[in-house]
Image (cartoon, rainbow, N blue to C red):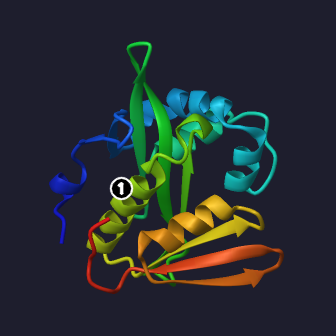
Amino acid sequence: MLSSADSLELEPTTLKDGTHIIIRPIHPDDAGDLQSAFMRLSTESIYLRFLSYKKELSDEEARRLANVDYLKQMAFVATSKEDGQDIVVGVSRYAMLDTGHPDIAEAAVVVDDKFQGRGIGRLLLWRLVNYARARGICFLRGNLQIGNDRMLTLVKRSGLPHETCYVDGIWEVTIDLQLPECAP
């Protein structure tokens, strides 16, 4: 089981294409960076992530997403250097569904369109999975739009046991975290 200190460390990684990223826990001061990252997403990526069209991430939404308690809500960001500054290029997060089910959390992953297909989503998912497991969460659940083939492929290729069912026009994907930990 991960200790709090271990799971909150920075994780520098070099991708196969040579891109350097850092995966780290989100901080409250990341709200503005989340808004900037949102503005770089394509309309399609916004729709697939938020299950609706949005023109912007409001200040209030960004603050809410950047402020997590690291227990019932957790988020990791992947950052990369662009013009000498760190930018958020991906986010993974979970939030507990309700107090009646403390072992199930809703989860999501989004990666900047320009950085998709490089393995960042997989790294973010595994960081979130390991953190959730260490906190006794048994299942991560996500709702995916029909046509969100990249996210379905990410889950399938992760090697994590999962179930997919079609509910009210969306795919509900549940990842089982109870099996022994595997390397990403």
Q: Is residue 106 visible?
A: no
Seen at 49% across and 36% down, the residue is 89
- Residue 172 is situated, as x and y percent measured from the top left of the image, at 66, 77
Q: Give the quarter of the figure containing the N terminus.
A: bottom left
Q: Nearer the viewer, residue 57 or 167?
A: 167
| Residue 52: percent from left, percent from top | 80, 52
Residue 122 versus residue 167: which sits nearer the camera? Answer: 122
Q: Residue furthest top?
A: 83
On screen, 68 above or below 144? above
The residue tagged 1 is: 70
Q: Residue at x 60, y 31 (%)?
A: 35
Residue 55 in picture, x, y percent from top left: 79, 35
| Res 159 quadrant in image | bottom left
| Residue at the image point whose x is 48% and y is 53% from the top | 121
The picture quadrant where one finds residue 141 is bottom right
**What quarter of the picture does the C terminus occupy?**
bottom left
Q: Is residue 26 above or below residue 126?
A: above
Give the residue type that dot 1 points to.
Tyr
